[in-house]
Image (tube, rainbow, N blue to C red):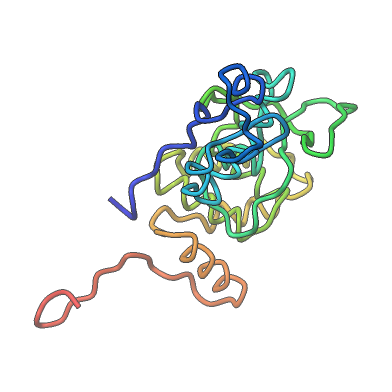
């Protein structure tokens, strides 16, 4: 196995609504609970153990839980990545993005629409998210090269998608569409042998500096065996 085993996505069953807690005699504002979104809480002991990606996943799940149409939202970009457990180089945003296929859909200070083509979303922990390959392409088109390559490497390494899946999603993007050139670069750089976000970032820096693409996980030996 390359790298550490994939940890399970954040479990939203840990989240509790204010009304549900008060119904059983618990007042979360008095301590012991971390507010994730207005009206949605997580035990402080659980929150303290969460990685950055899982904290954002908790925020995404809490947003869906508090939204009247949360079950039908199709989460995209960073929001889909967090729910899938995909790591990131940049700081996680303070908003949640969901896919819309027509103009005129309004958003809010937290929930932001992302206009794009239809996607065959997958159900993860009770909410719909764009599939891994589509998520990577969207991250490339609307985000940074660092984050998109990191996501692509992770998805390939953990077998969430294949290079063919990435190429297929890229082919769906119109030739002159915004961000397509960067998405094409990401597909070319993606390598499932990259074992960590740091290694992905270093490879992106090599690309920017026009250093030849490195060979990953190569064993070197001498007369005494493995070095």
Question: Residue most toward the bottom?
Answer: 223
| Residue 79 x %, y % | 64, 39
Q: Which residue is drawn at 43% across and 70% down?
A: 214
Name the foreground residue: 11 vs 176. Answer: 11
| Residue 112 x %, y % | 79, 36
| Residue 21 x %, y % | 59, 23
- Residue 65 sits in quarter: top right
Q: Which residue is drawn at 47% across and 45% down?
A: 155
| Residue 167 x %, y % | 55, 42
Residue 83 shown left or right of residue 182 in the figure: left
Q: Does residue 139 sit above or below 128 in this rendering?
A: below
Q: Which residue is drawn at 68% across and 55% down?
A: 182
Residue 46 shown left or right of residue 40 in the figure: left
Residue 125 shown left or right of residue 227 in the figure: right
Q: Does residue 200 sit above or below 25 in this rendering?
A: below
Q: Does residue 53 sit above or below 72 in this rendering?
A: below
């Amino acid at each position: 196995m390359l790298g550490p085993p994939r940890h399970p996505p954040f479990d939203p069953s840990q989240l509790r609504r204010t009304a549900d807690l008060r119904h059983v005699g618990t007042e979360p504002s008095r301590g012991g609970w971390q507010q994730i979104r207005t009206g949605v809480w997580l035990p402080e002991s659980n929150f303290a153990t969460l990685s950055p990606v899982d904290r954002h996943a908790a925020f995404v799940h809490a947003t869906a839980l508090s939204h009247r149409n949360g079950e039908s939202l199709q989460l995209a970009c960073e929001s889909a990545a967090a729910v899938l457990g995909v790591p990131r180089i940049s700081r996680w945003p303070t908003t949640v993005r969901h896919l819309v296929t027509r103009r005129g859909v309004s958003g809010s200070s937290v929930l932001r629409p992302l206009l794009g083509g239809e996607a065959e979303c997958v159900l993860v922990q009770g909410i719909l998210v764009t599939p891994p390959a589509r998520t990577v392409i969207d991250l490339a088109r609307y985000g940074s090269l660092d984050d998109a390559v990191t996501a692509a490497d992770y998805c390939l390494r953990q077998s969430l998608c294949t290079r063919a899946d990435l190429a297929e999603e890229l082919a769906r993007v119109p030739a002159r569409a915004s961000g397509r050139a960067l998405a094409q670069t990401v597909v070319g750089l993606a390598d499932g042998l990259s074992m960590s976000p740091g290694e992905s970032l270093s490879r992106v820096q090599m690309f920017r500096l026009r250093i030849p693409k490195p060979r990953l996980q190569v064993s070197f030996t001498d007369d005494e065996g493995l070095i």
